[in-house]
Image: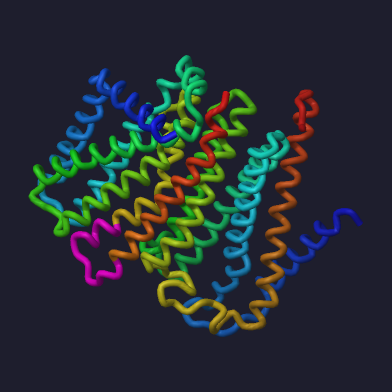
Amino acid sequence: MLSNIFRLVKKEVQLEWRQKTALGTIFIYVIGTSFLIYLVFQGNITIPTWIALFWIIALFTTVNAVSKSFVKDANEQFYYLRSIATPLEIIFSKIIYNALLITILSLVIYLVMILFFNENINDKILFLVTIILGSIGFSNLFTLLSAITARTQNFVLLAILGFPIILPLLLLIVKLSGLSDFAIQQKDIYLSLGAIGLLDVITLILSVILFPYIWRD
Amino acid sequence: MKNWWKYVCVILLLYTIVMGFAGPIPPLNILEQSIRNLYFHVPMWFSMMALMLASTIFSIRYLSRQKIEDDIKASACAQVGFVFGILGIITGSLWARVTWGAWWVFQEIKLNGAAAALLVYAAYFILRGSFDDEEKKARFSAVYSIFAFVMFMVLINVIPRISNSSLHPGNGGNPGFNSYDLDSNLRMVFYPAVMGWILLSAWITSLIIRMQKIFRKIHQLDIE
């Protein structure tokens, strides 16, 4: 099973690498959005605004990047994939691939935001951990939802479905990001980290349990 | 008497309305007469939660049994839950204006949780509208509603404990109603009110389910 998952992740990476336009689109989207926000805010913002903007850009980028993750597999590939892999392998490989993609995109946003705004988070290691944990959570949730929306022709649907239920995770992430800039008590950091970790586990379990019901004809 | 609970519902709600507007209340600062909203605002949320839970249970049952009947029930619960949620927001907003001074208060995770719940419902209905195939519609919306329910529970139960920003009684260091002002007079009306409103919501839901079933029968679709 593990080797199968690895092979499927590799397949995703190769497919993405082959179609560089799709990858380029999302990178330009990230840079374009960040630049737009830099101009709109006229170059000076406080750290809380910085954090809020960072996660909003990350969320919209996630929706755009993940929305197509099952579209390719909707028709002919669907039957082929079904015959070579179990639903569990599919969902795990998609989640791993999307988590990697979202993490990389978030790092790009981070770099662009540092470049444009002369602001940075104090505790950079903790912020990186936040980015990784947040990306995993985003991936768990949006991968499952994109499997649902891929069957409809409604492309705004992913955002509509995702935004209200990503809320608990997003609020925790923004809180932890704030703490990684300035924390009075170490205890608060551990509490937030634990809560986000727990939420990542919950969303993963839900996705894995529910995916087999979607992965049917 | 087969429909005894409907009679109970009518009697409880009549009692709630009469006692709610005319019954004795304890003297309270700030809240004053607005405490009477306790019999209307809070039960709306309890009813919505009960319906949300029921909708999720029917969704789980649909996924395990694949009977369209469960899907009809799940969606009917969601429809009525949505209406009760809107009523809860309206009554809550009125109450907030009187006691907190604004229709909508930002530093209030419960309000935002309520808005999120309504958004989830709205998304659920749009998702249902996006499918032509009935079986797919039922299956996918069941998956979404289970996921959304768990995340909603996290939102309203875990986040307020961590973010600690709520103006509601019993949160963020505010004393709860039961500690000092939910006195026996209020209790005498509050508990029947909760029962009455939940029964009413169940009643409306059962009517919608029956309507759906009749509709399917007329159009000769299978109910099983």
Front residue of this view, candidates B5 and B159: B159
Front residue of this view, candidates A119 and B14: A119
From the top left corner, tell me how far across and down residue A54 is, in percent.
23, 46
Q: Name the quadrant containing residue B5.
A: bottom right
Q: Main secondary structure of the magenta part?
A: helix
From the top left corner, tell me how far across and down residue B81 is, in percent.
61, 50
| Residue A113 horizontal side relative to residue A129, left or right | left
Count of numbered badges drawn on the protein: 0
User: Does A183 appear in magenta?
Assistant: yes
Q: Name the quadrant containing residue A187.
A: bottom left
From the top left corner, tell me how far across and down residue A61 is, in percent.
29, 36
Front residue of this view, candidates A8 and B181: A8
Quadrant in which the C terminus of chain B appears: top right
Q: Which residues are magenta?
A: A175-188
| Residue A196 horizontal side relative to residue B88, left or right | left
| Residue B187 horizontal side relative to residue B156, left or right | right
| Residue A32 horizontal side relative to residue B139, left or right | left
Quadrant in which the N terminus of chain B appears: bottom right
From the top left corner, tell me how far across and down residue B47 is, in percent.
63, 57
Residue at the location (70% across, 77% down)? B188
Residue at the location (25% across, 52% down)? A129
User: Does A15 appear in magenta?
Assistant: no
Quick one: which residue is furthest to the top in this view?
A76
